[in-house]
Amino acid sequence: MLRSLAGRVARIAFEKGGLLVLAVLAAYVWLAPAHVVDGDNAELSTLGALGGAAHPPGYPLYVLWLRATAWLPGATPAHTAAIATAILGALSIAMLHAACRAWGARPPGAALACALFAGAPVVAQMYSEAEVFALNGLVVAAVAWLAAAAGPARGWARAAALGLVAGLGLANQLTCVLVAPIGVLGVARAVRERGWFVLLAACLGLAIGLLPYAYLLVAPVHAATWGDLHGVADLVPMWLRADYGGPTTLATQRGDVSAWASLAALAETLGRTWLWLPALAGVTAAIGYAARTRDRREPRASWIAWLASFVLAGPVLVARFNIPPTGTGRWVVDRFHLLPALLLAIPIACVLDRVVARLRAPLAAGLAVAVFAAMLAASLPRLARVHAPAVEDQARTMLASLPACAVIIGASDDVGSGIDYAQLVLGVRPDVQYVREPMLGLAWYRARVASRGIALDGIVDHALDQGRAVFVERRHPDLLAKFAHYPFGIFTRLIAPGAPRPSVREVIDHNRALFAQLASYPRPHADDEWPALVHVRYARAWRELAELATASGDGEAAAWAEEAGRVLGPEP
């Protein structure tokens, strides 16, 4: 009996990727940040602690997962949500290993391909912080596994499982629909195996999988909850991302973006994720498998479906993005490249199978863990900087410094969602009100702002008349022309007409005391995503203070402010 148990454990560890998955789980949990690290992460961490609807399409399945795992022993609510996501990340690698094997790769090739993918910087980052992409990867890998000719189910069971996974996927991240060619292939196989009636099982599974959307109708409503849903009819605009302008629109404000620039960014991400040569080999192999059967277990139809899914999830999707892939836009679009990168694991596993096929299972499993560890070690310094507490510290420090009942008119997701997390989850300065100016065009948001006693017309004048301090982010030349103002941390404070204005020295001293409250962590580099953006704001504030001191003739203060900006700015 013990020998039988040991053999089963060995098969799971060495043939089914268990050893690699265990290493991935440990690494992702270790990487999980104990603080919020960007706007979406802050929003989802808040909802994991309190419940509610996320931005469209609502991501109800992921929010329910975070709520169900809120008991995990994280150091903070953000840490708990990150650990819950790390578990999904490890499960997605386990499912991807199973999918690679079902599509024809043997254990060594599947393990090595999964190790490369799991250790890629963008994957390790997104799969270890509170984000929806780890769950999306699990769903897509499950579709590929279930649809394969050598998949785990047949007939009714195959159809029902594919329908259920598709519904659950749509209740999480809409891009999973782009692998529909593979899913349809699986359902077609189920029809051939048991007849047309299996379509009923597929439809029933799909309906059950979509049930998490019902949660949005009963979800708690608070400052971080998106929308005002009253009935089933309200779910359709949420699902179709009507507030954003459509399913493939990433921002409420449309932009003219070159499709070629978006495609180039996709190619670069795929190349870096797969170390270039394996990515090229995988695409070439998939085209070859689609052109002729060769010796793969999957027939040509499967590889044609794979190519169609890859093109839809990759070039077709990114060509429609309305965010330029530069600066903060690049950090947003990179995460949408995860889906085609994951799909590439299947043909890459088949290619690697030829290279490592002769390795014994334990040696191959150990090699995969070593490759994963090496990949992760190479990206650890940057991961540590990207997961720095800059976004959360920015929100907490700036909130703590504001006068009572202040009003902030802002536009940045990381600032707004970071403040929501600090106020609603950590209890920091709930008296301050943050107004997201780009969202004032949404009727439900205007009603929510009005319910908090803020006038929708003439917000600044009304708040100043009430004796409230008003702050804006630096995107309001009309307000800055109308009101006297001065830098206040990352904001600009507007001064009511006739109110006294502090001296330049007083402004600098106040900002010096404010910035002295910042947490200590390694200074981010210029390409370290949101932490870098936070420190760009800090440096910009001190440059403005230096200009203010220079204009007043205070050279000593100007020099001090210039040096403070240099120290606080990101590393070049």
Image: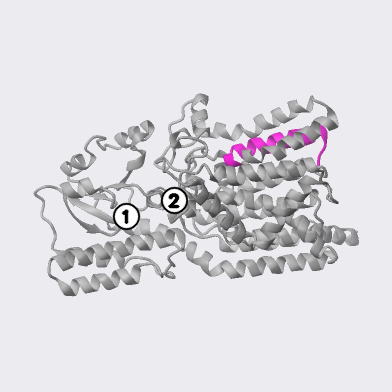
Looking at the picture, the colour scheme in use is one colour
Classify residue 295 as left or right of residue 211: right
Q: Nearer the viewer, mark 2 or mark 1?
A: 2
- Does residue 21 show up? no
Mark 1 lies on residue: 399
Residue at (75%, 27%) from the top-left corner? 199
Q: Say above or below: 239 vs 90.
A: above
Cα separation between marks 2 and 1:
16 Å
Q: Amino acid at mark 1?
A: Leu
The residue range painted magenta reads 152-175
Name the secondary structure under disc 2: helix
Residue 337 locus on image (x, y percent): 58, 51
Residue 94 locus on image (x, y percent): 72, 53
Mark 2 lies on residue: 39
Badge 1 crowding class, 10 Å Cα cut-off, few under 14, some 14 to 19, many 20 or more, is many
Badge 2 crowding class, 10 Å Cα cut-off, few under 14, some 14 to 19, many 20 or more, is many
Classify residue 457 as left or right of residue 168: left
